[in-house]
Image (cartoon, rainbow, N blue to C red):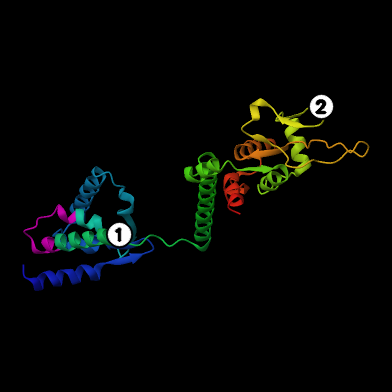
Amino acid sequence: MSNTEILRHEVTFERLKQEDERGEYWSARDLMPYADYADWRNWNDAINKAMTAFRGLGEDTRGHFSVLAPKSTGGRPRADFRLSRRACYLVFMNGDPSKPAIAAAQNYFAVKTRQAEVMEQQAPAKMPTLQEALRGWADEVDAREKAELAAREAEMEAALLRPPAEAWENLVDTGQDYDVATAASILNRDPAISTGRNRLFQWMLDSGMLYRRAGGQLVPYAAHTEHLRLKPQSRPDYEASDSRARKEAHAQVRVTVRGLEWIQQRMREETRPDLTEIAPLRNVISISSAR
């Protein structure tokens, strides 16, 4: 069959194509002459065989083979089928390809069916509605904010539990300690803590870090000797008004770096604030030590 004949048949099949709300289709009555059938009964049997083959492929025939409203030509209304592109392909595949019209139909519907499959695979995804797009954007923002919050919490927890070794060793090597007023000021940089010199003294007494000897001297308990130190005063505290005898000054209570961390941990356990609002105290101490 020449290219001219193939093209002529393709033009014919395109001309016979119809469209409705379900898409393109062909009338079985219109195609019957090209299947080399003169009798509707035999052509109807061929269509039924194609429907059986279609079911054998696990496909639903209703979208491809459906009955069209009978056409009246002045006599008895004629039955007809609405055939999809794939239905036409299967019907003509059962025909004799040695007949030019059938061979042309097989070629036409095979090519068109394959082209449609490729186009469906390459078709862009359905555009979302504005409401769907906004909902998707909101979900993405919410997920991103939750992930960022979880990352910040993990980072701050890690900083509290595993501070940089170099910074910690520098603090330990210097043997840094602070008077109680300065220690209270450093602790107050933690948003979860609010204290002052006198309140911190009272807290350490209530927490069993200190006890008061006769005469008023505050002394660390043995369990807290690495947290608190006593620094002897270099001058007398006052002179008695009656005897003018010099009284020895009380030793000054000093809070070590480890003591600050211990106090911060206990105070935070008492308040249990939101972790995301807490700065690691060791970082605060590092800043204070550098001043």
Which amino acid does the dot numbered 1 rest on?
Glu
Q: Along the polypeptide, which appears first: circle 1 or circle 2? A: 1
Residue nearest the observer in this picture, 120 or 199: 199
Query: Is residue 243 in the magenta section?
Result: no
**Does residue 154 appear anywhere in the picture?**
no
249 displayed left or right of 273: right
Residue nearest the observer in this picture, 143 or 103: 143
Query: Is residue 92 in the magenta section?
Result: yes
What residue is at 6 percent from the left and 59 percent from the top? 98
Find disc 2 in the rendering and name its residue.
214
Find disc 1 in the rendering and name its residue.
120
Residue nearest the observer in this picture, 144 or 221: 221
Residue nearest the observer in this picture, 11 or 205: 205
Residue 125 rendering spot, x and y as whole percentages: 38, 60
Residue 49 rendering spot, x and y as whole percentages: 20, 47
Whether label 1 touches label 2, CB < 8 Å: no
Element class at badge 1: helix
Q: CA distance from mark 1 to mark 2?
A: 94 Å
Which amino acid does the dot numbered 2 rest on?
Ala
Residue 56 rendering spot, x and y as whole percentages: 23, 43
What is the quadrant of residue 227 in the picture?
top right
**Does residue 50 appear anywhere in the picture?**
yes
- Magenta segment: 91-104
Residue 131 rendering spot, x and y as whole percentages: 53, 60
* Disc assigned to residue 3: none
What is the quadrant of residue 31 in the picture?
bottom left
